[in-house]
């Protein structure tokens, strides 16, 4: 009973810690400076400073934050200088007042109007270039994995040249644990130490050498021991 309650408390504390870590995880957001240009009703060129988040950039459009209100359905020209220079044509879909004091968007100047922009492509080369730019940003800002610093900037591999060997190559190398133990047999078996000693003694006898010593033939009996073993019991007692 007590163990189950302790496990429940530990599980609850672990869940709270995971939620706390998730909420305190740093998010990496990058802003960009924009200049919106359009013609007024009096045919004057109007320039409006704006900002955008690189997390919102897509080939179809993105959101911008402007200092003044802009009318919908107006075709504008936007200029982006950093991180890459573009002069694009877009259309204002809607403009909404959104009082925000976030430091990312409003550092020194307030940008209270959020504008939805739809891209208007008149040049296919420019469209392809901007799509490539958005694709490069997707790994760092737009995708879910790229929002976090530790995932957007992974550490390089310590040994990039090391590669996994193919399975066939690894399987060709025998495993020492799979080698069966050696067993003695009549064919091809390794001779024992006693057999080597006996063979050496036989070779010496055939070559005319002296009889092998007792140290070379540990199991052989000496002449005195052999004669004593041939005597009967009465003869042993008389001796």
Image (cartoon, rainbow, N blue to C red):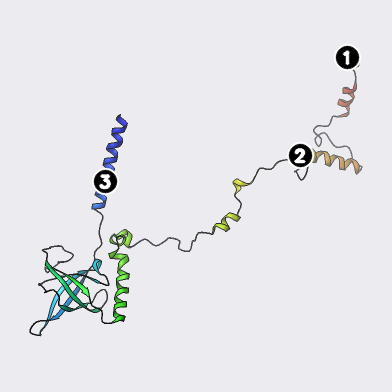
Nearest the viewer among 152 and 113 is 113
Which image quadrant is residue 15 in?
Answer: top left
Q: SS of the residue at dot 2?
A: helix
Nearest the viewer among 133 and 29 is 133
Q: Residue at x 31, y 36 (%)?
A: 7
Nearest the viewer among 195 and 82 is 82
Circles 3 and 2 in contact, beta carbons < 8 Å: no
Q: Identify the mark nearer the N-term, 1 or 2.
A: 2
Q: Residue at x 90, y 23 (%)?
A: 230
Outermost residue to the front: 73
Q: SS of the residue at dot 3?
A: helix
Point out the image quarter for the C terminus: top right
Point out the image quarter for the N terminus: top left
In this rendering, position of residue 147 left or right of residue 65 = right
Q: Height in image: 173 above or below 85?
A: above
Classify mark 3: residues with Cα within 10 Å, few (<14), some (14-19) or many (20+): few
Look at mark 3 in the image and give the residue it sits on. 17
Q: State the CA–CA distance, disc 3 to disc 2.
A: 70 Å
Look at mark 2 in the image and give the residue it sits on. 193
Q: Position of residue 213 (x, y in %)?
A: 84, 35
Q: Position of residue 146 (x, y in %)?
A: 30, 62
How many badges with numbers are in the image? 3
Q: SS of the residue at dot 1?
A: helix
Q: Height in image: 134 above or below 39?
A: above
Look at mark 1 in the image and give the residue it sits on. 237
Nearest-to-viewer mark from 1 and 2: 2
Classify mark 1: residues with Cα within 10 Å, few (<14), some (14-19) or many (20+): few
Q: Residue at x 61, y 46 (%)?
A: 178
Q: Residue at x 29, y 40 (%)?
A: 11
Classify mark 2: residues with Cα within 10 Å, few (<14), some (14-19) or many (20+): few
Q: State the CA–CA distance, disc 1 to disc 2.
A: 38 Å
């Amino acid at each position: 009973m007590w163990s189950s309650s302790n496990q429940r408390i530990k599980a609850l504390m672990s869940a709270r810690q995971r939620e706390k870590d998730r909420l305190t995880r740093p998010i990496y957001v990058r802003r960009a400076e924009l200049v919106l240009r359009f013609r007024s009703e009096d045919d004057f060129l109007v320039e409006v400073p704006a900002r955008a988040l690189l997390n919102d950039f897509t080939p179809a459009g993105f959101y911008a934050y402007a200092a003044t209100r802009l009318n919908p359905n107006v075709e504008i020209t936007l200029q982006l200088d950093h991180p890459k220079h573009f002069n694009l044509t877009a259309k204002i879909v809607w403009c909404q007042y959104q009082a925000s004091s976030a430091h990312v968007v409003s550092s020194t100047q307030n940008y209270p109007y959020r504008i939805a922009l739809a891209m208007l492509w008149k040049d296919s080369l420019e469209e392809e270039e901007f799509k490539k730019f958005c694709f490069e940003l997707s790994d760092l800002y737009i995708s879910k994995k790229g929002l976090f610093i530790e995932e957007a900037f992974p550490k390089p591999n310590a040994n990039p040249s090391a590669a996994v060997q193919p399975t066939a190559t690894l399987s060709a190398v025998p495993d020492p644990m799979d080698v069966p133990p050696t067993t003695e047999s009549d064919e091809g078996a390794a001779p024992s130490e006693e057999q080597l000693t006996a063979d050496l003694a036989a070779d010496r006898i055939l070559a005319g050498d002296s009889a092998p010593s007792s140290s070379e033939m540990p199991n052989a009996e000496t002449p005195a021991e052999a004669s004593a073993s041939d005597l009967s019991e009465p003869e042993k007692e008389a001796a």
